[in-house]
Image (cartoon, rainbow, N blue to C red):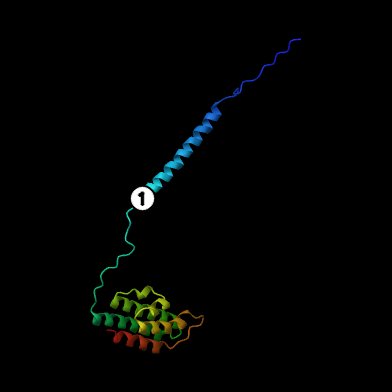
């Protein structure tokens, strides 16, 4: 009895799917490598910008500046006189005006500073005044003597050198 055994070839099936998968993987690998190389190249060539260049401060005419900002305090007082219940907006306005005045007068951006940062500057009068504004400005129930605070704000601006 003769028995013949025939073995199948190792790759007896279509090679096309294997070639397609291999081609897709090769393309993806090349694309990822190109993206990393391009990102590295762009970061390498990027010119470093200076972090912040402060423009040279030119002192303004302090007399005109005082008149302008004292007039803004007058507007705040007029709005408060129309509706004396609006304590918080009055203090918010005073804080904005006084900080902006000091910024324009000195070039120090105290209009963007927190109270803690203002306390670390040489403007202790401003720090004390802004500290007084904080409670009526940020408490749930705003209570404060707006007229007294306006008087102190005017005094700070008037005596500014």
User: Quadrant of the image for the C terminus?
Assistant: bottom left
Nearest the viewer among 132 and 87 is 132
Which image quadrant is residue 93 in?
bottom left
Is there any visible trace of residue 19 in the rendered image?
yes
Dot 1: what SS?
A: helix
Which image quadrant is residue 58 in?
bottom left
**Residue designated by label 1:** 44
Q: Position of residue 154 (x, y in %)?
A: 33, 86
Q: Position of residue 106 (x, y in %)?
A: 29, 77
Query: What residue lies at 38% left-to-right and 73% top-to-bottom?
Result: 112
Query: What residue lies at 50% left-to-right and 35% top-to-bottom?
Result: 24
Mark 1 burial class by Cα count in 10 Å: few <14, some 14-19, many 20+:
few
User: Quadrant of the image for the N terminus?
Assistant: top right
Residue furthest top as drawn: 1
Nearest the viewer among 109 and 36 is 36
Residue furthest right as drawn: 1
Which image quadrant is residue 116 in?
bottom left
Query: What residue lies at 47% left-to-right and 36% top-to-bottom?
Result: 27
Q: Is residue 31 above or below residue 130?
A: above
Is there any visible trace of residue 86 in the rendered image?
no
Q: Is residue 2 left or right of residue 111?
A: right
Q: Position of residue 29 (x, y in %)?
A: 48, 39
Q: Is residue 38 above or below residue 84?
A: above
Q: Is residue 48 left or right of residue 19?
A: left
Nearest the viewer among 131 and 84 is 131
Q: Position of residue 127 (x, y in %)?
A: 39, 82
């Amino acid at each position: 009895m003769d028995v013949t055994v025939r073995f199948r070839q190792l790759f007896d099936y279509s090679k096309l799917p294997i070639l397609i998968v291999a081609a897709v993987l090769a393309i993806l690998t090349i694309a990822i490598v190109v993206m990393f190389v391009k990102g590295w190249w762009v970061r390498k060539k990027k010119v470093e910008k200076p972090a912040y260049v402060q423009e040279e401060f030119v002192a303004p005419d302090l007399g005109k500046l005082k008149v302008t900002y004292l007039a803004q305090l007058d507007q705040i007082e007029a709005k408060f006189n129309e509706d004396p219940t609006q304590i918080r907006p009055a203090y918010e306005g005073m804080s904005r005006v006084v900080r902006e005045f000091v910024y324009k007068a000195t070039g120090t951006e105290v209009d963007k500073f927190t109270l803690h940062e203002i306390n670390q500057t040489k403007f202790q009068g401003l720090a004390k005044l802004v500290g007084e504004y904080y409670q009526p400005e940020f408490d749930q129930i705003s209570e404060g003597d707006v007229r007294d605070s306006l008087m102190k704000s005017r005094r700070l601006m008037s005596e500014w050198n």
